Amino acid sequence: MLDFPPTNLRDLRVSYDLDSLTEDTAPADPHVLFNLWLQDALAHELPEPNAMTLSTIGQDGGPNSRTVLLKGLDERGFHFYTNYESRKGRDLAANPQAALTFLWTDRHHQVNVRGTVRKLSRADADSYFEARPVGHQIGAWVSDQSAVIPGREWLEAREVEMTTRFGEGPVPCPPNWGGYTLLATEIEFWQGRVSRLHDRLRYTRVEGGWKMERLSP
Ligand SMILES: Cc1cc2nc3c(=O)[nH]c(=O)nc-3n(C[C@H](O)[C@H](O)[C@H](O)COP(=O)(O)O)c2cc1C
């Protein structure tokens, strides 16, 4: 018989009472509201405020989720960077439909985004890659992301190999590394409220703008 978890999970709960989200105060464009909530997370110094769960559709039809970092947001969508040959890269090549979830627990905020992903340009990849710390740049060459490897030693040996290969010179962006952008078709904002009667506003992209609807919590 397993003796965990140490706490009774059934008694763990938070009362959500910080704010409300109403149709008359919500902006017409969900990106404006997203930006306000991201700024709010930054202002409250939440850990990794740009971390988001990226869900893709696996080639076996099942879902795959993992955390990635939001690195930009513009008219092209929500940007993130990764290895194009990773599992997520292979999932997206086969099916560009994906979802993002942002959770800012301390602010009682969740945002769910659905949409279609496409690659950012090589120029975007080069420009972002150049701004990364050298160790991260080397790491991108070392890691065949998502591949099964023999052990930690293999990884560390490759790190030595790549560090020697690039020496003191600039580390170029690997050809299989780059950005994606998710263009939203739907963005849902969840504001925690008391008694689990949360506010949920869902924006759906329509001809020339966005439709807003309230969802039952
Ligand atoms: C906070 C956090 C941020 C991360 N950011 C990224 C990222 O921006 N890009 C990335 O490729 N992996 C990132 N990762 C690692 C991914 O979660 C994941 O392990 C990796 O991308 C391989 O996923 P895949 O095998 O599904 O392709 C991050 C992990 C954490 C915990």
Image (tube, rainbow, N blue to C red):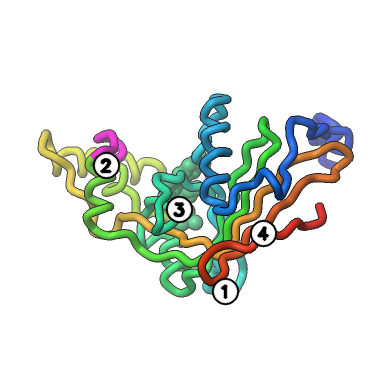
Q: What's the residue at 27%, 60% (across, down)?
A: 121
Residues shaded magenta: 131-136
Crowding near the residue tagged with mark 1, few <14, some 14–19, many ≥20 C-alpha atoms within 10 Å = few
Q: What's the residue at 57%, 25% (across, down)?
A: 44
Name the residue type under label 3: Phe
Mark 2 Cβ inside 8 Å of ligand 1: no
Name the residue type under label 4: Met
Q: Disc 4 on helix, strand or loop? A: strand
Magenta span contains residue 81: no
Instruction: List the residue tagged with mark 2.
Output: 137
Q: Which mark is residue 78?
A: 3
How far apart in space, not on screen, are marks 1 and 3 (Cα)?
Answer: 26 Å
For discs 4 and 1, the disc positioned in front in the rendered view: 4
- From the viewer's perspective, tell me whether residue 35 is left or right of residue 158: right
- Residues at discs 4 and 2 in contact (Cβ within 8 Å): no
Q: Disc 1 on helix, strand or loop? A: loop
Name the residue type under label 1: Asp
How far apart in space, not on screen, are marks 4 and 1 (Cα)?
Answer: 34 Å
From the top left corner, tell me how far across and down residue 111 is, in percent. 62, 48
Q: Earlier in the sequence, mark 4 or mark 2?
A: 2
Along the line of sight, which residue is nearer the eye, 10 or 26? 26
Q: What's the residue at 34%, 44% (across, down)?
A: 155
